[in-house]
Each structure stands twice: as structure tokens, then as C-alpha cells.
Amino acid sequence: MPSTSLTTGNRALNQLVTGFFGNVARAYDTAALQQAVYKPPQDQVVKELRAAKSRRIADIGCGTGILTTRIARELRPEVVYGVDASTGMLAQARARSSEVRWEHSAAEHLPLDDGEVDAVVSTSAFHFFDHPVALREFQRVLAPGGLVAIATMHPSAPTARPIQRLTRSPLFPAHAPSPRETRKLLEDAGFRVLDQRKIDRPIPSWLVPDVITVGRRT
């Protein structure tokens, strides 16, 4: 099994980002915030996992474990891992459920064996990852034909384009890839993209513009 070191890819300020989320973990669970921002992509991920009949699942960047716990409760898989680099987030996640196997680890260095799971999912966290490095890890831990489902922001207004060009630099802690970028990243990592669609929300999509991209390990 790989080391559980928090070695990450080449994104800057990883420790600062994980520390910040540790400090705001309680606010993250606010019902209104979850309902408006985080639940819609989670609904889509659960739908994909149910359709795929996934039985061994890893939720990467699981935060306080709301989606991970929901997967365990609603889908009753053989095993579900909740993986996050923030100790504060994981402290709340562990208090939420004892059914999930919680792991303190970065997305770029997963503490899972090769081919150990048949689904890898990530919601509202992918922009913090070193995308090529994390996707190679997703590919490694997935069994052949395994499902990948990633929900991520995609600011698409003309005013967002200069910011996106700027944040591609590894000097920035996060970069929100466009849908086209996300598709290419998955294909370059050896995934076959099956679907990519906007996520419906109870608030205007321009406030939280995101898509879900679904693929299979080839």
C-alpha cells in the first residue's frame, strides 16, 4: 500500500488551504450552505454510483463526510473510503459515521492499493488538486472499467477567462478547469468520458457554475 504522506502535486499553499478548511469545518456543515451549494452535485454523484452498481467507493476531498456518509447509508456498498487532507474536516467526518473508512491523505497520494475500488468520486474539491497527478492516482486505484465522477466549478463568463489563465500557474492554490479542460484531463489520464452535464441548482447557475464529468477507466 502506498505511503500515507501528505505529499501533493505542484499546487502552491496546500498546507494553508487544508488548514483553512480545518478552521471552517463547522460552518461548512450549515444547512443552507449544504442545500444551495453542495447537495446538488452530491445528488448527481449518488445517481451515477447507483446506476453503476458500484460496491467499493472512494470519495476524494470528502470534507466533513456528508456525501461519504450518505453513500454508505443509501447505497450500502461493501466499503466506502472518505479521503481528505484536512484534519479538521476529517474530525467532523469521523464523528458522523463509523461505517466509513476515513483516511487522512492528499488526492495526489492515495493510501489505497492498485485497483482497490470500482468507483472514485469527488465533488467541489477538484479545483484544489494537482489535476494530472490526482487523476493518475484515480486511475491507479480504480479497477478496470471502474467509474470516475467529478463535479467541479467552471467559471465561464468572459470576465473569468483571464483569471482562469492566471490560475493555471502552479503558484496558485486552485484552478477551476473548464468542461473542455476537464474532459481532456480525464482522457489524457486514460479515462473514457461517458457524459458531461451542468448541475441543476435552486440558485442561479452563474453563482455556482459547475458540471459533472463521468468516465470509465479503460
Image (cartoon, helix red, strand yellow):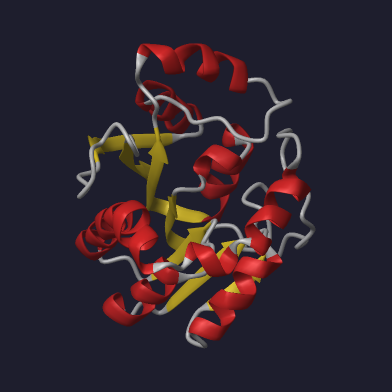
Q: Which residue in the rendered view is the most extreme toward the bottom?
A: 98
> Toward which corner of the image does residue 24 lie, by quadrant?
bottom right
- Residue 216 percent coordinates (x, y): 35, 44
Q: Which of 1 and 205 is in front in this view?
A: 205
In what quadrant of the picture does the C terminus appear?
A: top left
In what quadrant of the picture does the N terminus appear?
A: bottom right
**Does residue 108 lie above or below 53 as drawn?**
above
> Toward which corner of the image does residue 186 lie, by quadrant?
top left
Q: Which residue is drawn at 35% across and 52% down?
A: 37
Look at the image and tell me whether residue 109 can be seen: no
Tally of numbered discs: 0
**Does residue 54 lie above or below 171 as drawn?**
below
- Residue 70 percent coordinates (x, y): 35, 74
- Residue 165 percent coordinates (x, y): 55, 14
Q: Is residue 107 left or right of residue 196?
A: right
Q: Which residue is drawn at 20% across and 45% down?
A: 200
Q: Nearer the viewer, residue 181 or 200?
A: 200
Look at the image and tell me whether residue 6 can be seen: yes
- Residue 144 percent coordinates (x, y): 42, 51
Q: Residue at x 33, y 36 (%)?
A: 207
Q: Which residue is drawn at 49% across and 31% down?
A: 176
Q: Which of 112 and 17 is in front in this view?
A: 17
**Does residue 170 lie above or below 35 as drawn?**
above
